Image: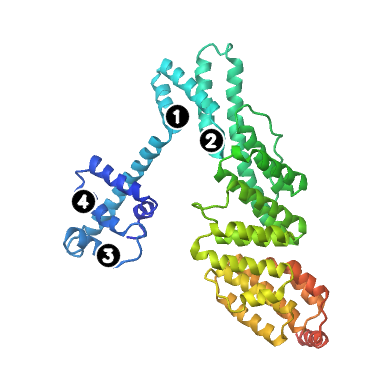
Amino acid sequence: MQKLKFLSLLKKLSKQELEDFHKYLKQYHHREKIGLSVFEYLIGFYPDFEQSDDLRLPHAYQNIFKTGFDTDDHAQKKMLNTASDLYKWLKNFLIISKTQQNQALQQTIWLSILQERGLKTEFSRKAAQFYQQTRNAPFKTNTDALPNWMASYFHREQLAMHSPLTHAKAIQQCTQTMTDCWEIIRLKMACEVSQVNKVTSQTSAPQVHEATDFQQIGLSILKETYEALWRLTDSGEEQHFVRLESLLKQYGQHIDTQELEWINRYAYNFIAHQSRQNQDDIHYERMHRLDIIGLEQGVFFRNGYLPSSAFGNIVTVACHSKDFEWASGFVREYSHIILESKRQDAILLAQAIIACESGNFQEVISLLETAVFEAQLDHLRSKSLLLRSYYEFPADQDLILEACAQFENLLRRSPKTEAVKAMLAFVLIFRRIVAQKSSKKVILDRIEKASVLYSRKWLIEKTVHYSPKYAARAIAAERHTQAIK
């Protein structure tokens, strides 16, 4: 039964919503005894509905109806039909709850009903009220475009019913707001398409029109912010990043936090993709500046806590930007906001990152050589930092090669995420540098051809000063192999 649509939706409910739905069933479907019995049995497994024999159809049927599953020819049909009914009732409950909680949605539905029924006087009055409410409300998130669009639509409809020539200016304003609301949604979608196009090397979307001014608080800000984001992700030019940064700093308080998170994340991911291509300092500086803005505006926090992954990323980017003093201050000021269960690992890894990027390799070895991290990505980062520090210290060649082999085995057993692929490419190239059996050209070719590669810039720097000991023999062997083929 774990695959039922009803259970997939039910597990998304909060405890309070679950209790409210139970009351809803008792009030509106109290005669549906089978449905209530099945529901009251299933909620005992809330919220995870993990694999259990008691959730399998035969066991559930027997526990609910106190009779054998195999003895009733209609048992399976009865259970599946009941689950289908419960899903329909839950869907109706959620729609009603959403409508009750969302005044704009209520008004939109009611105005639609008034318009359909031809109640022009009440429609006109309510349409004007709805329009004024939206015009006086702050425009903070992309989703505010829908109630603003609907309010402008209904207000324009009622104005057009009564002396449209007299209300020509107001009608035009409504029409313009509707156009602008769509433009915000379109710009957000254009940013998504631009991001995909950059990654997949497809042709970029056509240029958008210049942003126009708006009177409603937040509407122009959100549109101009998306305009700057789209132009940044389309061209990557500094002027568009500066424009986006300026808008976020000056007007971020007028934008909803979740919307700010989306904007920050898209800009950040785009710049991070650029950094993986060439690792120019400008990319890390931009990411660092976005991190500072994001911290000020609270976009990284989850239920009052700073995720340890975000904590580590922020420290890493600050160090790549050579802002070590800021990174150290950040660790001191923000480490207490990390969940206690993850805090020690996050602080240890952050200290190692700062030590490694600032050239204190002996400290990295001291911090990480015996450390074990619970999170896989933290564990991978620690191993890569340790390898780099062994090389820079410098440690014994055999020790480094043994550490490479262990790390490679770990990566090959891990799920093939992009991070794992980038780390594996790093280890394979790094091992060539340590072994000193490949020519400089071979190593540089490997670096250039790697689609994803961790510490690309550092590997290039080490290869520039690389001196092969056994390259001649390796090249001769390769030529001999090609001649045989």
Residue 442 image point, x, y percent: 78, 76
In terms of sequence position, does the residue under pointer 2 or pointer 1 come before the other? 1
What's the residue type where badge 2 is placed? Asp
Q: CA distance from mark 2 to mark 3?
A: 45 Å
Q: CA distance from mark 3 to mark 1?
A: 45 Å
Q: Which residue is mark 3?
A: 54
For residue 108, which numbered disc appears in the image? 1
What's the residue type where badge 4 is placed? Ile
How is the model colour-coded? Answer: rainbow
Question: Vertical placement of 167 versus 420: above or below?
Answer: above
* Total marks in image: 4
Residue 467 image point, x, y percent: 83, 81
Residue displayed at 25% across by 61% down: 60
**SS category of the residue bearing label 2:** helix
Q: Which residue is mark 2?
A: 144
Mark 1 surroundings within 10 Å by alpha-carbon count, few (fewer than 14), some (14 through 19), many (20 or more): some
Q: Which mark lies nearer to you, 3 or 4?
A: 3
What's the residue type where badge 1 is placed? Thr
